[in-house]
Amino acid sequence: MFGTCLENVKKTAPLVHNITNYVTVNDVANVLLACGASPIMSDEPKDVADITSICGGLNINIGTLNERTIEGMFIAGRKANELSHPVLLDPVGAGASTLRTDTAVRLMEALTLTVIRGNISEIKALALGSSTTKGVDAAAADAVTEENLAAAAAFAKRFAQKCGCIVAITGAIDLVCDGTKCYVIRGGRPEMGRITGTGCQLSGMMTAFVTANPENQLEAAAAAVCAMGLAGEIAFARMEEGDGNAAYRNRIIDAIYNMDAKMLDKGADYEIR
């Protein structure tokens, strides 16, 4: 099932418009190319409507906000909605500052979103109005664990139902939910947290997956999470003496590039709740 989602990305090569942060923009572009999609980056308000019009999906990442890019996000989001294109929101650091939280909430209210993808602290900040994030990292007290998994899955389902979209909460245990169904995904490596931008890369790739699989977007979003986690495992196994987080980042992208449907179906570690 998940392998078919990856195959559809490779077959259709969706063009994804990314309004993403300048810390990870190159990595997002490369991971999209690696999975078989095509990236385009534009955040200029006078440009984004035209760019969104020629793309299949829109990835909005609030990691490095300014007034100009915020304006571009709303213009692109409205155009994507007008064209019925999938829209993903990555609320990077929501809860860490008023600007980030307010911008994410305003985007949620103004746009029809297909997916909201973030760590548990960011999602809680949007759902509960709390300010518990540690920069762009999840607070330790918020982590999804085996002990609180049932409660976390119930929370994710409620929030997805409230928002009317897919909610993907990523961390040591990943949750990908709509209002009634939740994929619980165990995969990846803790060392992925030592790389800047694995979440941003996942958001770009997830946008491509839901764009290429319009009939089963929940499964497509879960497939993207499984693919990234599996890539982290494969990449870590290929680390050599002297390698560090820069090499690991590249090996993850290479693992995505070389992944096929059979590998993903075999390596995906998930259950449904």
Image: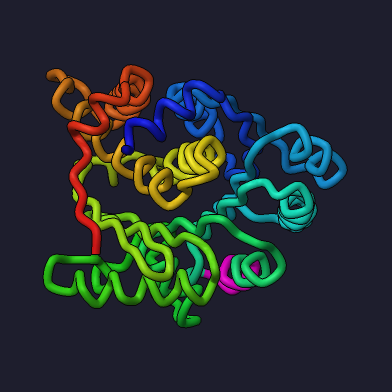
User: What segment carries the magenta color?
Assistant: 97-103
Report which quarter residue 194 is drawn in.
top left
Q: Quarter of the image containing the C terminus?
A: bottom left
**Residue at image coords 66%, 72%:** 109
In this rendering, is residue 116 above or below 22?
Answer: below
**Which residue is most to the right?**
46
**Residue at image coords 54%, 71%:** 163
Report which quarter residue 148 is drawn in.
bottom left
* x, y percent for residue 252: 31, 28
Horizontal side of residue 151 vs 52, given as left or right: left
Q: Nearer the viewer, residue 170 or 245?
A: 170
Q: Is residue 165 visible?
A: yes
* x, y percent for residue 76: 75, 49
Q: How many marks?
A: 0
**Which residue is most to the front?**
215
**Residue at image coords 32%, 38%:** 1
* x, y percent for residue 199: 41, 46
Residue 39 sits inside the magenta stretch: no
Q: How does the figure colour the protein chain or chains?
A: rainbow
In this rendering, is residue 164 above or below 64?
Answer: below
**Residue at image coords 20%, 27%:** 234
* x, y percent for residue 147: 12, 72
Give the main secondary structure of the magenta stretch. Answer: helix
In this rendering, is residue 104 above or below 55?
Answer: below
Report which quarter residue 253 is drawn in.
top left
Q: Is residue 24 visible?
A: no
Horizontal side of residue 217 vs 250, given as left or right: right
